Image: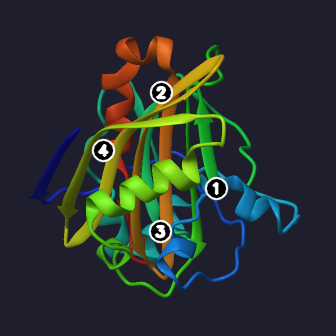
Amino acid sequence: MAVSSCSFTLVSPFLSHKSNDLPRNAATTPSSSAMDTTTSTVESKKQPIQKRRPLLLGIGALVANLQPSKLLLAEEVVPDKYRAFVDYIDGYSYVYPSDWKEFDFRAHDSAFKDRYLQLQNVRVRFIPTEKKDIRDMGPLEEVVSFLVKHRYAAPNQRPTIYDMQEKTVDGKHYYSFEYVLTSPNYSSASFATIAIGNGRYYTLIVGANERRWKRYRDQLKVVADSFRLLDI
């Protein structure tokens, strides 16, 4: 398992969709509660998830007039063969492969998947928190180990953490990590990036079947590394 830390300045890529509504969770104050990003936390609320995603092109002029400073956060050139998802309402952005399609992933705010390999996907969710920074959750190794072993892994899955990294982008801190969940008849590999901002605890997870991981790992790492918080 490799652990590294880096600091650099980067702005987020621009233009794809807009998502307005979010799944609402009870505010989390203790560290273990704030770490609970499993779908079961939101599913227990049994509230319908509704999303509206008008194209940013349709509201581009209005956003440009009202929030020019925020637009500047999202003007970096998007990597070739990727598109950018930018959500100015909920305060985050990331890129995803340009041939992926949007889909509804329960209890998540946005999600895209491969058109043919549906287990290959990216999804983002967030919950309220009183914490101000991801470092308030605890040290990198402690937080990642807790999440993978006690939140992401099901009882019948064996978790393995391969890499973790702390990075700082434009003064905002992120924890990113790579892990595999192995069950008796299926294994999945994923990257996760977590961050805190805007009174929310954000989680991006992008993954695939472990059998395809070696082939698609670098492509999916671009997605995980692209996640950025936007001030709202």
Describe the element under mark 2 as helix, strand or loop: loop
In terms of sequence position, does the residue under pointer 1 or pointer 3 come before the other? Answer: 1
* Quadrant in the picture for the C terminus: bottom left
In terms of sequence position, does the residue under pointer 1 or pointer 4 come before the other? Answer: 1
Residue 165's place in the image compared with 23, above or below, is above
Q: Residue at x 11, y 57 (%)?
A: 8
In terms of sequence position, does the residue under pointer 2 or pointer 3 come before the other? Answer: 3
Q: Is residue 61 left or right of residue 222?
A: right
- Select label 1 or label 4 by which is in front: 1
Q: Is residue 195 left or right of residue 53?
A: left
- Residue 31: where, in percent of width, then height? 47, 77
- Please give the residue where the numbered disc 4 appears in the rendered image: 225
Q: Residue at x 51, y 75 (%)?
A: 200
Identity, as a three-letter code, of the amino acid under mark 4: Asp
Describe the element under mark 1 as helix, strand or loop: loop
- Residue 37: where, in percent of width, then height? 58, 60
* Distance CA(mark 1)–CA(mark 2): 27 Å
Describe the element under mark 3 as helix, strand or loop: loop
Nearest the camera: 156 or 165? 156
Mark 2 and mark 1 in contact (Cβ < 8 Å)?
A: no
- Please give the residue where the numbered disc 1 appears in the rendered image: 38
- Select label 1 or label 3 by which is in front: 1
- Please give the residue where the numbered disc 2 appears in the rendered image: 98
* Distance CA(mark 4)–CA(mark 3): 16 Å
Residue 231's place in the image compared with 141, above or below, is below
* Distance CA(mark 1)–CA(mark 4): 21 Å
Q: Is residue 17 visible?
A: no
